[in-house]
């Protein structure tokens, strides 16, 4: 097609073409934010002015912030230069509690560190689509009850992926996914937290190839009362390394995890359909694996719709060794006089729903690890070790699919 030979017509077309191309282009923008004394202001302005699809790039260096960074725009990526190169330090935080607060879906955070926040490291609330990769959340002063509660903290979210990240020093849980659905937590390292990795009141979670060590409790699957989402179930915990979780509990008094005894590897509490397999679980000084009902905590239950019982649990094909040699807390006080030391590797409180009168708790092929039902309801008078009723199998759970890739 030839342009008109009329000069005015030719100019009009040349001007119109780039304008038309702008109208049909939906290209993502990249915004680089320089370091310097105005970094906090520029970063928050970029988050406020962001458009869906934007990538906000943060510079290398230790960047001091004094208030929470917040994002409410969908489909935005925040990217640093590496978890040891781009460091957001909140040591002098004056306003807000979280380091970053996100209330928009399609969110990606990658390649940076968040240090010493007053409260949670990264909190993502009520969204669909969360990706956190190669992020370090750390309280650099070591385990203290004044540290923030959670490192990486999606709550009431759907389609959550947390991978290749590091969390240290949280006074509740390092990686916590709560009241959420469709979750993948993989290839992370959790260390020197009260709870290393915790999946709470959530459905359909795959937690695999993580390392959880030097926490109070390594890997937790909980279902708790008095929360909007109660029916936690369907989690696969596999191919994780959960070892040496013997750090004294430093959670503030009154929190649920304040009751976790130091030396706990895996805890399954008041939840259903949990498959624990092909993990290496060792050298956790109180219990390598503990399966309990909420009633064992002796906390009051004011929620009439809450199910405090644990059922449909399958512990199999794990490598379990060591541990139980220096138990602490109420478990030590009650079980050591009865069972001696070291305590058996897999401990089950034996509390069942009186309406059902039974629960399916199965343990197989765990390298000779002893399974004990210690019969809390019966006052520890009817201990069952490696009972045939527990030498059972359950159908495999379905893998979490549809997002996250490999």
Image (tube, rainbow, N blue to C red):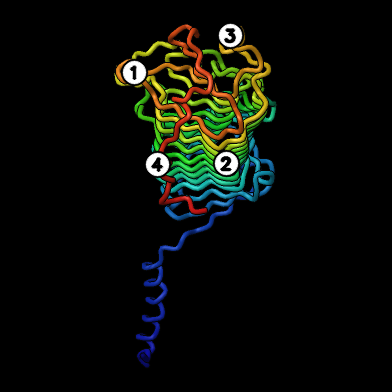
The residue under label 1 is 357
Position of residue 13 measured from the top left corner of the image (x, y, whole percent): 37, 81
Residue at 37 percent across and 24 percent down: it is 227
Q: Report the residue marked by disc 2.
A: 239
Give the number of the mark in front: 2 or 4. Answer: 2
Along the line of sight, the residue nearer the viewer: 334 or 58: 334
Q: Earlier in the sequence, mark 1 or mark 4?
A: 4
The alpha-carbon separation of the residues under discs 2 and 3 comes to: 33 Å
Residues marked 1 and 3 touching at CB (< 8 Å):
no
Q: Dot 4 lies on which element?
A: strand
Dot 4 crowding, Cα within 10 Å, few <14, some 14–19, many 20+: many
Say which element carries label 1.
Answer: loop
Q: Is residue 55 above or below residue 244?
A: below
Sequence-first tag of 1 and 3: 3
Q: Residues within 10 Å of mark 2 (few under 14, many from 20)?
A: many
* SS state under label 2: loop
Q: Is residue 60 left or right of residue 277?
A: right
Disc with the residue nearer the chain's start (2 vs 4):
4
Give the residue drawn at x 51%, y 39%. 207
2 or 3: tag closer to the N-terminus: 2
Which quarter of the figure has residue 114? top right
The residue to which callout 3 is attached is 338
- Residue under numbered circle 4: 158
Closer to the eye: label 1 or 2: 1
Count the numbered circles shown: 4
């Amino acid at each position: 097609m030839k342009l008109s030979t009329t000069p005015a017509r030719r100019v009009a077309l040349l001007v119109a073409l780039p304008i038309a191309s702008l109208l049909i282009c939906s290209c993502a923008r990249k915004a680089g934010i320089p370091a310097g004394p105005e970094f906090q202001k520029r970063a928050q302005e970029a988050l406020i002015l962001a458009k869906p699809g934007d990538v906000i790039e943060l510079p290398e260096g230790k960047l001091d912030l004094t208030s929470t960074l917040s994002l409410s725009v969908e489909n935005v990526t925040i990217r640093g230069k590496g978890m040891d190169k781009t460091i957001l330090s909140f040591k002098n935080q004056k306003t807000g509690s979280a380091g970053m607060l996100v209330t928009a879906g399609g969110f990606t955070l990658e390649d940076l560190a968040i240090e010493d926040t007053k409260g949670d490291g990264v909190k993502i609330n009520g969204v669909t689509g969360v990706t956190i990769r190669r992020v370090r959340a750390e309280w650099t002063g070591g385990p203290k009850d004044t540290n923030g509660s959670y490192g990486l903290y999606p709550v009431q979210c759907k389609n959550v992926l947390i991978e290749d990240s590091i969390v240290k020093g949280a006074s509740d849980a390092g990686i916590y996914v709560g009241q959420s659905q469709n979750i993948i937590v993989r290839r992370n390292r959790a260390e020197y937290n009260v709870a290393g990795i915790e999946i709470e009141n959530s459905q359909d979670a795959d937690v695999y190839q993580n390392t959880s060590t030097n926490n109070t409790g390594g890997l937790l699957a909980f279902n708790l009362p008095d929360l909007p989402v109660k029916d936690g179930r369907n989690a696969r915990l596999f191919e994780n390394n959960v070892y040496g979780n013997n750090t004294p509990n430093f959670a503030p008094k009154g929190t649920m995890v304040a009751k976790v005894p130091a030396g706990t590897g895996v805890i399954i509490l008041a939840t259903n359909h949990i498959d624990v397999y092909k993990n290496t679980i060792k050298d956790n000084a109180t219990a390598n694996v503990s399966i309990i009902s909420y009633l064992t905590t002796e906390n009051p239950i004011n929620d009439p719709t809450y199910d405090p019982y644990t059922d449909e649990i399958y512990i199999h094909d794990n490598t379990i060794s060591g541990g139980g040699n220096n138990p602490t807390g109420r478990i030590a006080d009650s079980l050591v006089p009865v069972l001696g030391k070291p305590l058996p590797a897999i401990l089950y409180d034996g509390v069942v729903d009186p309406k059902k009168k039974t629960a399916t708790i199965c343990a197989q092929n765990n390298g000779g690890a002893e399974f004990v039902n210690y019969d809390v309801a019966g006052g520890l008078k009817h201990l069952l070790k490696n009972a045939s009723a527990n030498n059972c199998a359950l159908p495999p759970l379905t893998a979490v699919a549809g997002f996250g890739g490999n």
